[in-house]
Image: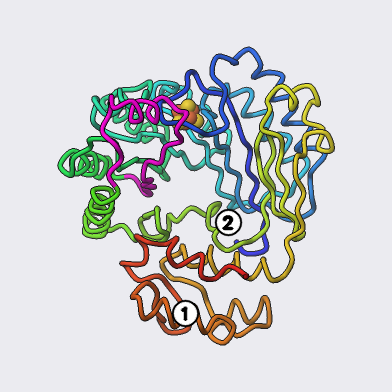
């Protein structure tokens, strides 16, 4: 996987906006999808590189609003312009309520080999608060349909730390999710911007505030329950059965190159971080022309590359390898960061494990407390 390119395609359309969402996604703009696909194909063609593609990830938004024909066109562009590894992981994010078995069969045949389902909760009240389009039963049906359609690599996204969510309600979602036997689980703590409907409801006292202590208890419960069910906790928010870690996201955590196309997509290429516009109209007007849709281009100097490699690596349970840092930057990790490491070890947030520096279990809950200490002055 190392030295291969991760290719990300952003699809910023949703049927409607969820109550907690601050992602770049547009509701009620389905009529623009065909023009968006044309623009994506143009951007992909113009930004093709010779580096072998090790993973493709179509995220959103709701990429399962793309028709199989549109997915076929995008994949055809990718395969004609890039060299794609035969074993490349190809993920599509999908939301229950937008898919059925025949759709899933069609996209599986096109080469999508990993499905990431936005389940979020298996409690109907919580799904309503969140403003999701589906019920718990529909979420379970989506998993069943995915299996019938031949998907053997499934991720379920779940959210914890919801306003008023009890430990037992979260326990219920976890247990039900485990009964579905996914290969991979991503668990995210709810965080809210003030201007989203749920943020407003909390501000106006119509919903209880977020409770970080309960959220920490829910995280701990998940750690115990998932580990007991045979999942390996390999990144702060991610668990997988053996052999099913997300190859695409590992590229980010190893601070390796990735190319992002589409509205709001980011890239990290040749030590430059690039960001596309978040404005759908501007992207469409430019038909995805890379020079017109780029909003930011920042050179990442070696000092920052090192810091980012350490911080991203600490997100992984195995931690950061002394040998990788030595090989990549010619720097002794323990020497270079002696002071923050000593401090964090004494606080019980990080530890040495052989030739790796990693967060402790306690540190995984307080990652940011550790990360900022590695930032340059
Ligand atoms: S489906 Fe995802 S991207 Fe779309 S509105 Fe809901 S949370 Fe946002």
SS of the residue under disc 2: helix
Q: Residue at x 54, y 60 (%)?
A: 253
x and y, in percent, of residue 117 in the image? 41, 35
Residue, disc 1: 341
Decide: is 267 above or below 93.
Answer: below
Quadrant for residue 41, please give it.
top right
**In the image, the residue with mark 2 has its CB under 8 Å from the nearest atom of ligand 1:** no
Residue matched to label 2: 252
Say which residue appears at 70% left-offset and 43% top-offset: 275
Q: Is residue 197 shown in magenta?
A: yes
Work out which quarter of the rendered image holds the N terminus and state it.
Answer: bottom right
Which of discs 2 and 1 lies nearer the camera? The answer is 1
Near-viewer residue (115 or 338): 338
Bounds of the magenta span? 182-211
Q: Residue 104, can we see it?
A: no
Left or right for 287, reference 353: right
Residue at disc 1, secondary structure:
helix
- Quarter where residue 220 is shown: bottom left
**Would you place residue 334 above or below residue 128 in this image?**
below
Q: Tell me if 194 is positioned left or right of 6 in this view.
A: left
Q: Which quarter of the image is occupied by the C terminus?
A: bottom right
Q: Is residue 83 above or below residue 341?
A: above
């Amino acid at each position: 996987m190392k030295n291969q390119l991760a290719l990300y395609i952003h699809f910023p359309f949703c049927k409607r906006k969820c109550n907690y969402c601050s992602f770049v996604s547009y509701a009620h703009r389905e009529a623009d999808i065909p023009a968006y696909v044309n623009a994506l194909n143009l951007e992909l063609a113009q930004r093709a590189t010779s580096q072998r593609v090790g993973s493709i990830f179509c995220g959103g938004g709701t990429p399962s609003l793309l028709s199989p024909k549109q997915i076929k066109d995008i994949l055809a562009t990718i395969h004609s312009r890039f060299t794609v590894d035969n074993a490349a992981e190809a993920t599509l994010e999908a939301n229950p309520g937008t898919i059925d078995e025949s759709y899933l069969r069609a996209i599986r045949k096109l080469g999508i080999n990993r499905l990431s389902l936005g389940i979020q909760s298996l409690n109907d009240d919580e799904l309503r608060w969140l403003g999701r389009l589906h019920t718990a039963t529909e979420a379970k049906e989506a998993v069943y349909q995915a299996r019938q359609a031949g998907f053997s690599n499934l991720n379920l996204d779940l959210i914890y730390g919801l306003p008023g969510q009890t430990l037992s309600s979260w326990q219920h979602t976890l247990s039900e999710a485990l009964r579905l036997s996914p290969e991979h689980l991503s668990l995210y703590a709810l965080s809210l911007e003030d201007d989203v409907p749920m943020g407003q409801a909390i501000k106006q006292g119509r919903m209880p505030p977020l409770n970080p202590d309960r959220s920490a208890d829910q995280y701990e419960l998940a750690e115990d329950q998932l580990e007991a069910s045979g999942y390996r906790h390999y990144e702060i928010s991610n668990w997988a059965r053996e052999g099913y870690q997300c190859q695409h996201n590992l590229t980010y955590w190893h601070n390796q190159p990735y190319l992002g196309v589409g509205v709001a997509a980011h890239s990290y290429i040749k030590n430059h971080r690039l960001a596309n516009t978040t404005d759908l109209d501007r992207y469409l007007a430019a038909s995805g022309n890379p020079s017109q849709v780029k909003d930011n281009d920042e050179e990442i100097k070696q000092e920052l590359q090192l810091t980012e490699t350490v911080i991203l690596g600490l997100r992984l349970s195995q931690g950061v390898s002394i040998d990788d840092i030595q090989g990549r930057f010619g720097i002794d990790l323990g020497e270079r960061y002696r002071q923050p490491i000593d401090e964090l070890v004494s606080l019980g947030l990080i530890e040495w494990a052989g030739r790796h520096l990693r967060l402790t279990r306690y540190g995984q809950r307080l990652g940011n407390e550790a990360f900022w200490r590695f930032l340059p002055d």
